[in-house]
Every structure is written in structure tokens, then in C-alpha cells.
Image (cartoon, grey):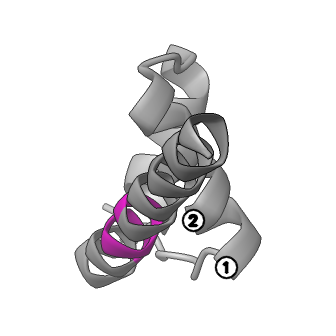
Amino acid sequence: MAAEQKSNASPLQVIKAVFWSFLGIRRRAEYEKDAVSLKPAQVIIAGIIGAIVLVLSLVTLVHFIIS
């Protein structure tokens, strides 16, 4: 049996995967490709950063609307 080599995902690939996961829209083929190339640590860090950006964006939007 040939062992599959895991290729490292670029930061842009990680960001795209997390973004589409936040929206809940993913193609099966893209999910399977990401599952092979992404490391859990990359996804966790990108998810935390994405959540912070989302919350700060919403707070800024609400502050802008209220003022």
C-alpha cells in the first residue's frame, strides 16, 4: 500500500475553508480535499481569528448604526 503524503495547505486555503465553514456552504469534493491537506491546529487558529473578526465587525456595525 502506498502511503498518502499530506501536503501543507497555504494560509489562503485555510482561510477559505474556515470562511465557507462559517457560512455552512461546502462542496463535498472541497471538503475532502481540505480534510487531507489541513492540519487541526491550522483550522483551530483560523477559526478563532475568524470568530474574533466576525464579532468585532458586528460590534463595529452596531456601534455605527446606533450613533
Q: Could you classify mark 2 by the number of other residues whose Cα lies within 10 Å: few (under 14), some (14-19), or many (20 or more)?
A: many
- Looking at the picture, does residue 40 appear above or below residue 65? below
Residue 7 in sight: yes
Q: Could you classify mark 1 by the number of other residues whose Cα lies within 10 Å: few (under 14), some (14-19), or many (20 or more)?
A: few
Residue 7 screen position, x and y as percent:
58, 77
Residue 57 screen position, x and y as percent:
56, 54
Q: CA distance from mark 1 to mark 2?
A: 5 Å
Residue 47 screen position, x and y as percent:
35, 63
Q: Would residue 47 appear left or right of 54 to someone viewing this image?
A: left
Q: Would residue 1 appear left or right of 27 to someone viewing this image?
A: left
Residue at the spot 42% in from the left edge and 36% down from the top edge = 22
Residue at the spot 53% in from the left edge and 51% down from the top edge = 63
Location of residue 36 (image quadrant)? bottom left
Q: What range of the chain is rendered magenta?
A: 46-51
Give the position of the N terminus as an image quadrant: bottom left
Local secondary structure at mark 1: helix
Location of residue 10 (image quadrant)? bottom right
Residue at the spot 57% in from the left edge and 56% down from the top edge = 60
Local secondary structure at mark 2: helix
Residue at the spot 51% in from the left edge and 41% down from the top edge = 62
Pointer 1 residue:
11
Which mark, by number, is residue 24?
none
Q: Are marks 1 and 2 in contact (CB under 8 Å)?
A: yes
- Mark 1: amino acid: Pro
- Mark 2: amino acid: Val
Pointer 2 residue:
14
Asked whether residue 24 is drawn in magenta, I would say: no
Q: Would residue 1 appear left or right of 57 to someone viewing this image?
A: left
